[in-house]
Amino acid sequence: MEKTFNAAEAEGRIYRAWEEAGCFRAGANARSEESFCIMIPPPNVTGALHVGHAFNNTLQDILIRWHRMRGFDTLWQPGQDHAGIATQLQVEKMLAATGQPGRRELGREKFLEKVWEWKGKYGGTIIEQLKRLGCSCDWERNAFTMAGAPGDPRTGHENSPNFHDAVIKVFVDMYNKGYIYRGKRLVNWDPHFETAISDLEVENIEVQGHMWHFKYPLAGGETYTYVERDEDGNVILEEERDYISIATTRPETMLGDGAVAVHPSDERYAPIVGKLCEIPVGPKEHRRQIPIITDEYPDPNFGSGAVKITGAHDFNDYAVARRNNIPCYRLMDTRGHMRADGAPYAEEARKAQEYARGKPFTEAEIDAINLVPDDLRGLDRFEARKRVVEQITAEGLAVMTRADDPRLGPNAVKPGEEGADALVPLVESKPIMQPFGDRSKVVIEPMLTDQWFVDAEKIVGPALEAVRSGRTKIIPESGEKTYYHWLENIEPWCISRQLWWGHQIPVWYDEDGNHYCAPTEQEAQAMAGEGVKLTRDPDVLDTWFSSGLWPIGTLGWPEDTPELRRYFPTDVLITGFDILFFWVARMMMMQLAVVNEVPFHTVYLHQLVRDEKGKKMSKTAGNVIDPLEIVDEFGADALRFTNTAMAAIGGVLKLSRERITGYRNFGTKLWNFARFAEMNGVFEVEAHDIPRPQRTLNRWIVGETAKVREEVDAALESFRFNDAAHALYAFVWGKVCDWYVEFSKPLLQGEDEAARAETRETMKWVLDQCLILLHPIMPFITEEIWGLSGQRDKMLIHADWPEYTAADLVDSAADHEMNWVIGLIESIRSARAQMHVPAGLYVPLVVTEIDERGQAAWDRNEALIKRLARIESLTRVEAMPKGTITIAAEGATFGLPLADVIDIGAEKARLEKTLGKLAKELGGLRGRLKNPKFVESAPEEVVEETRANLAAREEEEAKLREALERLSELA
RNA sequence: GGGUGAUUAGCUCAGUGGUAGAGCGCUUCGUUCACAUCGAAGAUGUCGGGAGUUCGAAUCUCUCAUCACCCA
């Protein structure tokens, strides 16, 4: 074997060998009927592997490899998501960069051809990256959420079930069941992509913003007495006003105001409720008047207590408008520009005025009205905002304040400075929450549009019930709370998108606006009647609608495939906390609605992978760790082991290069254990079943192996991946390499032929067990060593996972003896180091008393102890010679006669320190045992354990005291 | 404002009522025939503060503080 494992050279070669042998295929290595299936959370077809994917897929691969080795009929189903917005964006960018005609120029059909072409070329990127990580997905089944859609050339997902048909069928079924409807509602509108997006795709970010305060004059020059009181009811301000003061962060939306609302209990405005006020923008001669109404929504303690109601451009306002039958005037077009359609402003304002005075209206009539003044039409919303502010201020309708008002923020003049008492418009500078599109990064505009919705309330019941009853379990448990909270307050799900790349909605309209929902145009035509002219709804479905069907869709539903019968419901879903709502909850709802079955029995949620300081990785922060660079530098196994060790349930995930280095070193350690085995003829031993050796050392390590096998299984059973990793790390490094290998040297290199043979056989088995148990976490290095270390029937990936137990294999006598030996060696080493005995020097050891068991242990392990503790000889003495360092062991008192080298002071200090520690422990133990209530109420084994512990500590203390006394005599 | 969670060694974090742990880092020593990507030895803790329940609390309860995330 080479000196170290060459990951860069070996990984590709090993992966190809697995693939060529069909090791990942569904059912490969199955020895039982029991199935185990994981659906990969489909990465975006535009995606590149990031640390989150690396983490997430490592855990999936561990579970998959573990089950496959255990003989389950295993399927890890891979695939990609068509990612509507992101893909459309990528392709548009590509068209622009290569000087090709843009999307609109090409038209829908040609553009979609380009998208398919792009998908064929780049869509497989992430698959290749997952392979570098070692993911053992059944790639021949690679699925795609747009498979089977018109124009699909079937590149990269040749065997994918027809997802398109499944999606269309579900839409039609849900429509027919009344779960899907079309309606005009306020949705989040992305002005960049010109499409509706879901509220989950909106990021609310706090930005530095402004709050303007304006006066809305009362109609007809009316006035009222405005009275402000403090908490005790004392009047602090009383003045005659002819206006009501309104604050807003979006002045351009004032053009669409339908009312001003105040809280019903707000006495300040009671005199003017029901009157009209004037919106202070637009041409003076056509100024619109709107009613002052009461509603529970305004907070009397916030701002002026009065809120303008712009139903078409704000979610809270929309609710108020609906409650009070206030018209919702749409002000913007799809690009977020002020509307330029409709009649001249004068005419539109007149119409609106009639509605404000009580004329009945319909939604369509209101939507047709364009209340943007002629001079603002066509402007970008932010430019319009600037103009509106200027116009109002110029007219003197801005609320004024002193120039040193701190609310002005950075624009305020310092108190006492020149101009501090001047009056300026009150424009508060304050942080405000602003919605941004998570893909486009532009400010999202609430917009009143026609969209398709899933009436989620109607299908949420079974999804809630499934988790409440435990049919599906969410790990960590806190995820269940979050799940309930969201589902219990679920909103209608807007599923239409104004995009081209996606599943086009299977609905056709006739010329009268009636619609027909059917899987095909022919069927829609049949519904509409012959000769009726139909046009298809141009919108496509939200990508999450199709990925909501991922579990059944990838298995071939609606066809009754063998895979569907065998692997559905699937077993575990491993995904990020952040898509609990986006995806997990929706899969639950949809699978239950469509096939009346939960999609999986366990959901494992994990946190975002962050940098070593706990910061989110982002390009702008420059702290992004590229998993592929890590794989290049340290090997995939090191990254995988790090991810596994980080994976505490619910834990924060902080990735650092230091940790990765540490686990790369662990791989090297394992490698060198194998090299040692090779050099000692272990590779030549034929692999055996569980060995039943005679020598204590070998019996001991067999038992230790059984213990760690149980630990690993228990940890993986309960998704404590970190515990599995730590147990194996401690076993391989701390037990096998630190002790077993060292102890084996005298046996392997000694004269006793039987001992040598037995040790070789045991070591072979131990090495194999290490490889098997580590394989799910570190597949490459283990497979490589497996191949190098002997003739094998099967590759390690298909080796049988062991089932032996500690109860069968642990020999408690061997266990006790080896712990005694290890303890003795550690004590001697510690004493030597503290006495500054040269490391290489062999020294004599004496013993005053030693019981039978101790003597037997010594006799059996003399060679090991002498070698590892650097002992020259053991002599029985009556009393410790002067200047001897005492080593207390169970059943024996040893001494290192170091008169020449001994530093009495140092030795005294050493003993006193140890005694100090002992005294503390003894105090605690005695205190507890002296307490009658402890003896009464604590479980018997705890009391027993405490007693035994006390006895052992007391024995040790006595020996050390004796030693200390002898030392004092000497001094 | 609502919700969820966190606070344990210098750092990063495990630890669901019974002797406070790991990795990294640090100090000292060491090129003995698997491994310097290594070995040996060592130091380091009012388990965020306070109160309570209990024979016994890092762990359960309450409270305060600080921080993080999600949703408004």
Image: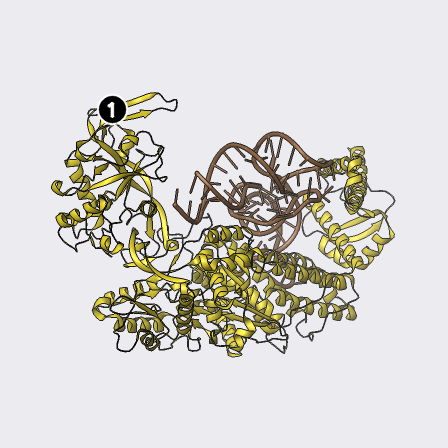
Residue located 21% across and 34% down the image = A218
Give the x, y percent position of residue A292.
27, 38
How packed mark 1 is, by other alpha carbons closer than 10 Å (few <14, some 14-19, many 20 or more), is few
Query: Is residue A34 shown left or right of residue A318?
Result: right
Residue A642 in view in this figure: no
- Location of residue A923 (image quadrant): top right
Residue located 24% across and 54% down the image = A367
Which shade is chain B?
brown
**Which residue is at the front of the view, A67 or A915?**
A67
Give the x, y percent position of residue A898.
75, 44
Query: Is residue A752 shown left or right of residue A414?
Result: right
Residue A866 in view in this figure: yes
Query: Which quadrant: the N terminus of chain A?
Result: bottom right
Residue located 29% across and 71% down the image = A112
Query: Is residue A264 shown left or right of residue A53?
Result: left
Tag 1, which chain? A
Give the x, y percent position of residue A772.
62, 68
Which shade is chain A?
yellow
